Amino acid sequence: MEYRDPHTFFQKTYLTQGLRELLDAVVARLSGKKTGQAVIQIQTPFGGGKTHSLIALYHLVQSAKELTSFEPFKEILETIGLAELPKASLVVFVGTAADPLRGKTPWGELAHQLGQYPLLQEHDQKRCAPGKNLLHQLLSNQPTLILMDEITEYAVKVKEYRDQLMAFYQELTETVKVLPRCTLVVTLPSSAPYGEEGERVLHQLQQIFRRVETIRTPVEGEEIYEVIRRRLFEDLGDPQAARRTADAFFELYQRLGDDLPKQVREPAYRDRIRKAYPFHPELIDVLFEQWSTFPDFQRTRGVLRLLAEMVRQLYQERHPAPLILPAHLNLANPAIRGEFLRHIGNEYQGVITADIDGPHAKAGKIDKEMGSEYTRFAVATGLARAIFFASFSGSEKRGVGIQRLRLAVMQPGLPPTIVGDALHRLEEELWYLHIEHGLYWFSNQPNLNRVIVEKEEAVTSQQIQQEIRTRLEQLAGRELRVTIWPQLPQDLPDTKELKLAILPLEYTRQASPTQTFVLELLNQYGQTFRTYRNTLLLLAPDEAELNRLRQQIKRYLAYQAIWHDKTLLRQLSEENKKTLQTRLKDTDSAIAHLILSTYRHLAKAEDHQCRWLDMGLPTLGTQPSLAHRVCSYLKQEDILLDKISPKQVLEKAVGKDQPQKPVEEIYEAFLKYPNLPILKHRQVLVDAILQGVRDGLFGVKIGDQTFFQTTPGQVGPDALLVRHPQTAPKTSPPPPTPAAQQPPPPPAQQMPPPTPHDTSPVRTIHTYTLRAAIPWDRLSAVVHGVLSPLKQDGAELTIELRLHAHSPLGIKLSTLEHKVRETLRQINAQIFEQTED
C-alpha cells in the first residue's frame, strides 16, 4: 500500500544524493531544460535502489500535481527554476511481466500506452521493429517518460525476434536522444541470467545503451544506512541513544587495538555506527558487498525482509544487545533461514541444523559448556552465524578472518578472551566449518572434524586400553619397581625393594570394589600374609580424568588412522593436513599429562586399613615419570625419607625396654610396619646409625667390638644397635708430639666399662611357656618381637596353634581346603586336632 500512495511512499523514502539527482535530471528533461538527460541507466544496490527509483519516477509523473507542493519537490523545482512539476505521458515496460509469445512487443506496448497502437500495430503483430521516423512520430507530440525494467531477461526469452528487439532499442535510444522532452530510464543487471546466452544478450544491450546513456546510482556509500532505517522504522527514538552506543563501541574498539581491523578504530567509523544505528555497519556491509552480488537477491528485496525479520524477533525477545550484529542473525528462524537458502540451496539446511542453529547444534552445545555467566552472549553460536553470513556471495569472495569475526560478535561487557576460546572450540567440533589461509567459511562438504568422528567410531575399547597400557609403560619410570595392572596379590613380589603397582582401569578411586582389591594387594601375598607391607605403593585412576583420557586416546588413534590412510590423506587440503599434523602432535603431548592427572590417587598400608593420598593435578609443561612423581610427593609429605635422624630411629624402631637390637631387624621394621616412614634404601638407616654413634646417642656392636662416639667400620647385617645408659667420660687430648714421634692412631673408642651394677651375674631362665590371645593381623610382630629374640638366645621353640574361626556368613569350603589346609601342608604342620561345623 505504501508504494501506491505517493505521499506515504515519499514520507518513507530517504532522498539520497543519487536519487535526488535522478529526479532532478528527469524533471529537467521533461521540462525541456538542457540540463536533463535523455537516456539514463540505473545502477543500484539492494533496498531503496532500482525498484524504488522506478517507483519514485512513476509517482513523479502520475502524481505531478499532488507532489508539486511536497517539500522535497519544492527544492527540486527551485533548483531547476520551475513553478510546478511538468505534465508528461508515462510508459512502463517490465520484461518479467510481459509475455514474449502472445503479448505485445516493447514497441507495441509503447504505442498502446500512449494511445497510438494503430500506428505500430502491424509492426507489433509481425514482430518487426519500427524505424526512427515512426518512433519520432509516436513520441514527439508530448513530454514522455519511458521506464523499462528487466529488459535483459525479456531479450533472453525472445529468440525468434531478438535481432528485431535489439534493432528497436537502437532506434529508440537514437530517437529519444533528439527529442528534447523525452526521457528513457532503463535498468540492466550487473550479471546476466541464463548463463552464456544471457551474457551475450547483456553484452549486446550494454553496447547499445552505452553510446547514449547516463549512468545514475541512486544510493551510494553510507546513504544505504539511512535508506534502510527510513524503510524499516517510523521512529528511532532518542537520537542521543545512537550517539552513546557509537561512543561505547568505539571505546571498546580502541581497547581491543590490533585484534580488530584498523579502519574500525578510526573516528570515521564511530560516525558510521551512529548512522547505521540500530544496525551494526558490518551487518549492512556484508549484505551489500557479498549477498547483493547474487543475481536475484536485489530483485526480491530480500535484504529488507531479512532485516525486518531480525528486528521483529529481537524486539519480541527483548534482546538486550545495544546494536544488531551479524551474530544476531538467528538461522533457527524459518523466515531468515529461508531467505538465505533461497540463494545458496537447501543442502545447507543440514549444515545449519548440525553446526549453527537448532536444538542439537554443536555451537549451542559449546555455549552451554562455556559457563552460565556467558550464556546470554551465546558467543559460539554468534561466531558460527557470523561465519555463515560471510561464507557466500555471487562472486568468488567467501570467508571471514578473525579480526572481522571479533567485530561481528564483540560488544561492551563481553570479555575478549571468550571469543578466542569459543572459536577454538568451533574449529575442533563443528563438522562443516573450513579454515584456510586464515579465513573461516561454511561448506556443505564435511571437514576434517567429520572425518575424525567417523574414524573415532571405528576405534574399539580394546585399542584404547592397549594404547593406555603402552603409554603407562613409557611413563612408568625406574625410581621404583613398577608393575602395571596387577590382577592378583602374587603379581606383586613380597621383597624389600620399594614397589609401585599401577592398578587396572576398572579399579578407579571412586569404584566400590577398589577398596577391597587394594587391601588384598597390601596385606596378602598369594596364600600368606604380605611381610614387607611398607614397601608397596598403589596408584588408582580417577574416574573423571580416566574418561577424559579415554576420549583423548580415542581421538589420537583416529588422527593416526587418518594420517596412515594415504588415500584419505591425499583428499585433504594442505591446510587440513597441517591441522591434522598439529592436532596429532598436541594430542600426543596432552596424553602424557592426562595419564599423570588420571593416576593421581596413591594408596599405602596403614594399620588394618589403607591410607589414600591425592597427589593433585600435575604442573602443566612437566612430564615426570609416574614413579618419580610418587617419590617426589612422598618426600614432600615426609613419608619417603632419604635421610632420617638417629633420634627417630631410636624412638620409632627400638623399644624403650630393649638394651640392644640387631640393625637388620631395625631395617626390617621399616620395611614391614606401615606406621613407620618409608626409607629410600638401607643406606639411609646406616647413615643415621653412624651419625648416632658419632653423636653419642647410642653405640653399635660389630662382632666383639662396641663403638661409641666414633666412626665404626662397615655396619653389616650382624651389627647390633646398643643403647648407652650414661654419657661417656670425656678425656683431655694428649700433648702434641712431633710428627716423627707421634704414636699410631689409637683403636676405635669402645663403650665405657660397665658400672658395678652391670657386673652382677646375668639372670636367666631355662623354660618359657606362653598362652595368649593375639590379634590375627599382628602375627608378624609376634614372629619378630617374640619368637626371634627367644631363638637368638638359643632357645628351642615348640609352637602349637590354637585357632577358633567363626563367621556368621559362613567360611567357604574352598577357602578351608585350598588356602588354609594347603598352607599347613606346605609348612609341614603336625595336625593334632581340627574340627568344622
Image: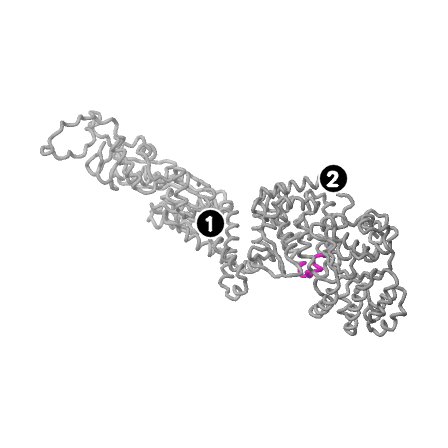
What residue does disc 2 label? 238
Q: Secondary structure at mark 1?
A: helix
Question: Where 151 falls versus 682 (above or below)?
Answer: below
Question: Where 463 falls versus 204 (above or below)?
Answer: above
Three-letter amino acid code at disc 1?
Ile
Cβ atoms under marks 1 and 2 closer than 8 Å: no
Question: Where 117 falls versus 14 (above or below)?
Answer: below
Q: Is residue 305 visible?
A: no
- In the depicted view, which residue is nearer to us: 478 or 72? 72
Residue 18 is situated, as x and y percent measured from the top left of the image, at: 74, 53
In the picture, the disc for residue 595 is 1
Question: Where 689 falls versus 445 (above or below)?
Answer: above
Magenta span: predominant SS is: helix
Q: How many numbered discs sit on the rendered protein?
A: 2
In the picture, the disc for residue 119 is none
The residue depicted at 60 percent of the width and 60 percent of the height is 446
Three-letter amino acid code at disc 2?
Asp
Magenta stretch, residue numbers: 338-349
Which of the two discs, 1 and 2, labels the residue nearer the N terminus?
A: 2
Q: Is residue 369 visible?
A: yes
Left or right, 782 with respect to 417, comes to left
Left or right, 323 with respect to 673, comes to right
For disc 2, the neighbor class at 10 Å (few under 14, some 14 to 19, many from 20) is: few
- In the depicted view, which residue is nearer to us: 451 or 501? 451
Residue 775 in the magenta stretch? The answer is no
Residue farthest front in this picture: 34
For disc 1, the neighbor class at 10 Å (few under 14, some 14 to 19, many from 20) is: many
Q: Secondary structure at mark 2?
A: loop
Cα–Cα gap, marks 1 and 2:
60 Å
Residue 685 is situated, as x and y percent measured from the top left of the image, at: 30, 38
The residue depicted at 37 percent of the width and 38 percent of the height is 677
Picture colour scheme: one colour
